[in-house]
């Protein structure tokens, strides 16, 4: 049997294959990511691999004549996970769940399979494939979580061909693979976890899921910078990409949807880690709010959107005289470039210079805010700290700030106001164009609605003047 050998260079960032080494990958532009791999393949193995990559044939159809059907879903029994998935698990869908080691990925999937088994009964069959732990270790975790005597089939295996044979014989509805980096196929000679192995195993499991209508959940490792390890093509071939976020020293965990073909992206699920595993948090805003007994300078509460959910987050700012020649700028949970931009706006349009002051800002609770609706809250928090003038404790703020000092409207302003009123806030500084229709006009500055006082501003100076005149 003929054996063919060749040396190729694979990019660890995007998975591109080159015949010669280069300092920079021509596909993704990353430097020093090309790694040499020597592949030995028999002719029969190459033939099997080529046949496996062939997609099933289909005829050309007219788009307007295709009957669109809603995808049925299986509820996981965990509402926060259903929210992130877009309503539940879709048959034939492939989900990639990534996160730091020890953050709770395996715990969440084991709990979800247990809830699925209880909720769906005998109508749903599951299979848990573990490549990192033995069956005894998984059983010990289930006992700690109070999930003893679960009727969930468990397979401790890393060889892809064996896993596919078991799936073919048992034909489960949902398969969990923990993790994809431990799997390997005999058609490749590279080590498990390499770019080629991860890509080939994920592609084979995805083909199986689409052909047989089996839902597959893949657990993925992350790199030091927090991105999923392996080729980026892994994120492209799956239907849903979820990231597990949170500090391992904190009990709170966030599950964020980065990509979802069956639902809205950027949805957020909030959990609390305890002795019995992960528990849902019914009121996530309570995690990110620290209601001070007395007003304190440098604290502002903003209403932000995470998918379809409105969260209230406390933005803290601290300004101090710089002890060095260069003033420091540090941002946690907010974009550093946005902070520098807003400090320049404060200097130019409000006349408040921070050139000789260190500025530190923080989004409480470990949440990461990327939307520009946090601009006005950040400006007022810095202004409050610089002037040593606290904001009212029952005040909520949101709005985008432009370079010319204007306060721009943000999307879904009414939902933000309703969520703040629900949590007991009585005042809101918002963009004038986000005021309800009955308040809009050339001279309208706001009014009372549902027990909340709305203060509409069109310039950042107006918001700072309002804070300045508060007692």
Image (cartoon, grey):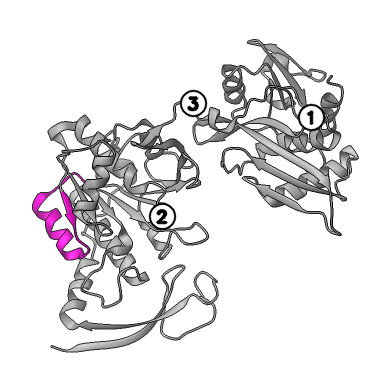
Within 10 Å of the Cα at label 2, are there few (<14), some (14-19), or many (20+) other Cα atoms? few
Q: Is residue 178 rendered to the left or right of residue 253?
A: left
Mark 3 or mark 2: which comes first in sequence? 2
- In reply to whether residue 173 is colored magenta, the answer given is yes
* Front of the two marks 3 and 1: 3
Left or right: residue 224 versus residue 187 is: right
- The quarter in which the C terminus is drawn is top right
Q: Secondary structure at mark 1?
A: loop
Q: Which residue is mark 2?
A: 101
Give the number of callouts: 3
The residue depicted at 67 percent of the width and 17 percent of the height is 437
Q: Which residue is mark 3?
A: 283
Query: Mark 3 or mark 1, which has the lower sequence index?
Result: 3
**Label 2 near label 3: C-beta < 8 Å?**
no
Percent coordinates x, y for residue 382 in the rendering = 78, 38
236 over 184 or under it: above or below: above
* Magenta-colored span: 154-174
400 or 470, nearer to the observer: 470
The answer to which of 108 and 256 lies nearer the viewer is 108
Crowd band around label 1 with a 10 angstrom C-alpha radius: few (<14), some (14–19), many (20+): some
Quickly name the residue at label 1.
458
Q: Please tell me in which quadrant of the rendered image residue 350 appears.
A: top right
* Element assignment for label 3: loop
Q: Is residue 44 left or right of residue 461?
A: left
How far from the left and from the top, in percent, is residue 66? 29, 42
């Amino acid at each position: 049997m003929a054996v063919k050998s060749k040396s190729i260079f694979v990019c660890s960032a995007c998975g591109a294959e080159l015949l010669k080494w280069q300092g920079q990958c021509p596909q993704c532009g990353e430097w020093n990511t090309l790694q040499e791999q020597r592949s030995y393949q028999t002719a029969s193995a190459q033939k099997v691999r080529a046949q496996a990559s062939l997609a099933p044939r289909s005829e050309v159809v007219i788009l307007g004549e295709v009957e669109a059907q809603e995808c049925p879903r299986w509820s996981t029994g965990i509402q926060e996970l259903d929210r992130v998935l877009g309503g539940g698990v879709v048959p034939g869908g492939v989900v990639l769940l990534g996160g730091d080691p020890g953050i709770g990925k395996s715990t969440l999937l084991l709990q979800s399979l247990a809830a699925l088994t209880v909720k769906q009964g005998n109508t749903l069959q599951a299979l848990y494939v573990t490549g990192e732990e033995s069956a005894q270790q998984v059983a010990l975790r289930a006992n700690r979580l109070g999930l003893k005597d679960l009727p969930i089939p468990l397979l401790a295996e890393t060889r892809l061909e064996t896993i596919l044979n078991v799936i073919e014989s048992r034909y489960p509805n949902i398969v969990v693979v923990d993790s994809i980096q431990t799997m390997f196929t005999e058609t490749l000679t590279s080590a498990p976890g390499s770019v080629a192995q991860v890509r080939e195993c994920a592609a084979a499991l995805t083909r199986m899921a689409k052909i047989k209508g089996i839902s597959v959940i893949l657990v993925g490792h992350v790199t030091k910078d927090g991105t999923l390890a392996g080729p980026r093509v892994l994120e492209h071939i799956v239907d849903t990409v979820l990231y597990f976020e949170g500090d391992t020293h904190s009990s709170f965990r966030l599950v964020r949807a980065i990509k979802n073909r069956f639902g809205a992206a950027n949805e957020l699920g909030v959990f609390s880690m305890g002795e019995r595993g992960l528990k849902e948090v019914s009121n996530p805003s309570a995690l990110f709010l620290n209601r001070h007994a007395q007003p304190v300078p440098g604290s502002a509460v903003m209403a932000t959107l995470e998918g379809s959910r409105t969260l209230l987050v406390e933005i803290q700012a601290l300004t101090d005289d710089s002890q060095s020649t260069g003033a420091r700028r540090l941002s946690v949970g907010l974009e550093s470039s946005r902070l520098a931009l807003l400090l320049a706006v404060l200097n130019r349009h409000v006349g408040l210079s921070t050139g000789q002051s260190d500025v530190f800002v923080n989004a409480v609770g470990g949440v990461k805010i990327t939307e520009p609706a946090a601009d006005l809250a950040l400006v007022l928090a810095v202004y409050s700290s610089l002037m040593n003038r606290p904001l009212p404790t029952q005040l909520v703020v949101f709005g985008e700030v432009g370079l010319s000092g204007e306060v721009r409207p943000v999307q879904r302003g009414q939902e933000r106001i309703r969520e703040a009123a629900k949590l007991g806030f009585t005042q809101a500084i918002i963009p004038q164009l986000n005021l309800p229709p009955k308040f809009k006009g050339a001279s309208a500055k706001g009014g009372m609605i549902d027990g909340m006082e709305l203060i509409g501003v069109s310039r950042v100076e107006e918001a700072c003047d309002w804070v300045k005149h508060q007692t």
